[in-house]
Image (tube, helix red, strand yellow):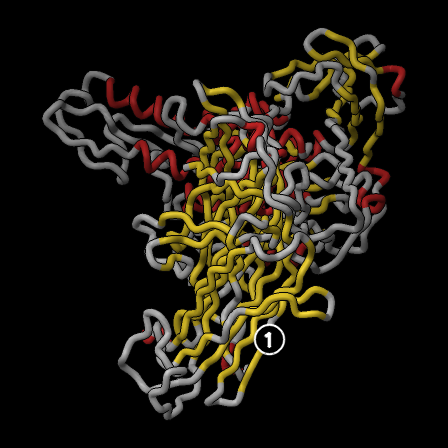
Amino acid sequence: MRTRVSGLALAALLLTSGAAPQQQTQPNNTTITFRVNSDLVLTNVVVRDKKTGQLLRGLTQKDFSISEDGKPQRIISFDFENVDEAVPLNEATIDASAPNGVFGARTGTATQAELRDHRLIVIFFDLTSMQPEDVERAQEAARDYISKQMHPADLVAVVSLDATLSLDQDFTANKQLLLRAVNSYSGTQGQGFAPGATSTTNQVEDATSFTPDEEEYNDINTDRELFAIEDIAKSLRYLDEKKSLLYFSGGIQRDGIENQASLDAAINSAVRANLAVYSVDARGLQAISPLGDATTGSLRGASAYNGAALQNNLDSNFNTQEVMATLSSDTGGKAFFDSNDFSPAFDQIQKDTSAYYVIGYHSTNLKRDGGYRRLTVRVDRPDVKLEYRRGYYAPADFKHSTKDEREQELEDELASGLPDTDLPVYLQALYFRLAPERFFVPISLVVPGSAIPFVKGGDRDKATLDIIGQVRDTAGHDIGDVRDTVKLAVNESEQVRQKNVQYTTGFNLPTGKYHVKFVVRENETGRMGSFETDLYVPDLRKVPLKMSSVVLASQRVPAGKKQDNLLVRDGEELVPNLPHVFRQDQHLYLLYEVYDPAHATLEKTAEAKPAKDAKPEGEPVRVMTSIEFLSGSAKVFETPVIQAIRLNEPDRDAIAFQFDLPLDSLKPGTYICQINVIDDAGGTFTFPRTAVLIRPTATAGTATPAATGN
């Protein structure tokens, strides 16, 4: 069950910092990060005799030259793949799992060396765009290939897109497994969910008729299809061999420039993964009638007689094929339209991947502008014909990336199994009980102000942070997520270098174990940092004295309308101090709660005064608490004992304790702060401890006030 993000503190708070909190790993006092830019450009080249069409073998690296936008490039890697030399894998299935990908079956493994000289083919059924008869035609073609054309060197996977993207069979040479996957699609699965993907549409009508606007719906479906291709490509990126995607579709509808970002992303991912797309229009050979077919209503007006309806149907059919053709041409594949015989598509894949040369180089153009770069390959042999990809899109750095690309970058980093450490990020999670088995979990993130580049904006220094986060349960289900952009504006960015930027949000979670990951990006250079950890929401029924986390804070800020979280008390919100570093001129604010205290019969004495804000209703309890500071083994400070005889949070069966401790009487140094809690009526107790560092009062000229950015 997903939970909404609690409206805690969706703002950034600049906190005075003396020391940074602990990162998730800190082997020593100095952290050095090495980042290598290894943008290797790979292209496959098929060399044929111009007269006979026969493949030319035996060429060496010296026979090839390659240029990018007319500038010669130095070839640094060269290989020749030949399926005739493939070593059989004994019909073993290889593991094509990869982070963030659809390939996850683990029915066997094969090493990179064992994959050499094999064909890697993915058969992709886009069920959302095909009618039932289209699905049957595609299935029949796939069955014929598997049964009659499949070569021993072919390793094939089967993927489908319906309600979700599904890996139905991982790469295998086992024909029975492949046939089982292909036969699993029923004729009712192809429902033509993508409007405009059917054989004909009639949009030219009289002005008095009504035509529903389906453009936005078409855009959504087209994005789903393109995202699926992008996901498949990313899953295969770790395999060096050339991969082929046989894409069965009933057409993809695109409206003008809409979906361009999704199309570019799919093509770029395929090119980087060395994946060629072979598009097949599963509608086959169509007889387009000016009156339309059974999928459309009867025409009105004169469009059926003046040729406008026929032209519209022809244009619509062409438009649904145009995206498929672009996918194929830009990735080095081919498109197959207007034919009921799909076997040439399989023949072409086998032909293109029977024997080919793989050339790699590092581009001399170091600009990361995302621009298109044209490739030219030459062979020092007369009368040859070359087949290769004619260009690629260069990587784009942060400043040249689009809004969609930046958003996708955050999503990719959130899903990545590897942490990003370019921007230091620290995290703390607390818990407060809402109900017997449900808790409010506030999560605070801290980024050192010195790591954020501010830019001048008017009379203030400004910066923005993008934040994305996710909580998953042990089964990997998404329980809650956060996506926010925080804008910072300060009078002098130099002050921020001595502070931390803190962001707080929260989740309502049941008892259990979770995995939390957050990614923060500063939007000047695009540097990102991530923090992930396991989170345990305790089952307090199993402990003698039920108690929340202890909040230590040095700031209280006006809460405004944010009254729906448990860090807001008396109209002010406590800002957790993650590093537990304070100054002598500050106050230490503590907050914690005790749940389900034992009932007791108390006499009204001078000592047994109700705690502040205690409610008179309810049975009496007797809970005592105090705070003490230890330096070594010596006690240097202790508050008076506070006694509560009533629940001051009766709706949650809780007693909330708050302390406001001035620190000017304590000397600078490190202390152990011990919280003493005794349930006298129940005979239970607990003494949680935490380290606290107190620094001297800031001297003149040092930025002491806390600033708030919205």
- Left of 165 or right of it: where is 36? right
Residue at the spot 66% in from the left edge and 16% down from the top edge: 367
Residue at the spot 87% in from the left edge and 15% down from the top edge: 63
Tell me residue 205's x, y (percent). 18, 25
In which quadrant is the C terminus drawn?
A: top left
- Left of 301 or right of it: where is 570? right
Q: Is residue 73 above or below residue 283?
A: above
Residue at the spot 64% in from the left edge and 48% down from the top edge: 695
- Residue nearest the observer in this picture, 578 or 138: 578
Residue at the spot 28% in from the left edge and 22% down from the top edge: 310
The residue under label 1 is which amino acid type?
Phe
Tell me residue 257's x, y (percent). 40, 22
Give the residue at mark 1: 687
Label 1 residue SS: loop
Q: Quadrant of residue 287?
A: top left
Work out whether residue 334 can be spotted: no
- Residue nearest the observer in this picture, 612 or 62: 612
- Left of 484 or right of it: where is 383? right
Tell me residue 145's x, y (percent). 63, 44
Q: Residues within 10 Å of mark 1 (few under 14, many from 20)?
A: few
Q: Quadrant of residue 497?
A: top right
Work out whether residue 211 can be spotted: yes
Tell me residue 593's x, y (percent). 45, 71
